[in-house]
Amino acid sequence: MKNSLNILLIEDNLIEIMKMKRTLSFLDLPHNLVEAKNGEIALNILEEKTNLPDLILLDLNMPKVSGIEFLTILKNSDAIKHIPTVILTTSDHQKDLEECFKIGVSGYILKPLKYDDYVKKIEAVLAYWSINELIKY
């Protein structure tokens, strides 16, 4: 039995947010999606410590607080560093990939151009994390 996930999507691009919502709807997945348009908003959501997400999907290229800056703050906080964080980005720079894994990212997914490929990747990521035993606070 798959678990329903509370997902925090940190993404500044409205089209990408709509694509994620459309994908969840298309796949008929029961997950709860909370959106943050940048890392600063996401940190405010996480500071409340009520209803922490089970999974964070994080874009790298964002205004105010970049994905790597957000990830660094997240992984340096004992209260929230346990939350699995998967990078969802267009950046295929080896430097970004290495930096994210060094900080402690749970996965690094390149956003494909074709929507069908995007759906398959998102379905696989969410299926994997929905069967994991996740820490609940």
Image (tube, helix red, strand yellow):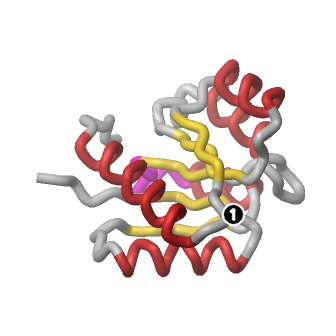
Near mark 1 (Cα within 10 A), the count class, few <14, some 14-19 or many ≥20, is many
Is 24 magenta? The answer is: no
Residue 26 falls in which quadrant of the image? Answer: bottom left
Is 49 magenta? The answer is: yes
| Residue 34, x across and y down, in percent | 51, 68
In the image: residue 78, left or right of residue 5: right
| Residue 109, x across and y down, in percent | 59, 45
Instruction: Please determine whether, in this image, residue 128 is positioned above or below residue 135.
Output: below
**Could you tell me which quadrant the C terminus lies in?**
top left
Most foreground residue, 113 or 86: 113
Query: Which residue lies under the disc numbered 1?
Result: 11
Tell me the residue at 79%/29% (across/down): 94
Q: Which residues are magenta?
A: 47-54
In the image: residue 126, left or right of residue 56: left
Q: How many marks?
A: 1
- Mark 1 lies on a secondary structure that is loop
Most foreground residue, 118 or 46: 118
Tell me the residue at 28%/49% (across/down): 130
In the image: residue 29, left or right of residue 98: left
- Residue type pointed to by label 1: Glu
Q: Residue furthest right?
A: 64
| Residue 18, x across and y down, in percent | 59, 80
Instruction: Please determine whether, in this image, residue 49 is positioned above or below residue 100.
Output: below
Q: Residue furthest top?
A: 102
Tell me the residue at 69%/37% (across/down): 71
Report the magenta stretch's main SS.
Answer: loop
Tell me the residue at 46%/66% (across/down): 119
| Residue 8, x across and y down, in percent | 53, 58
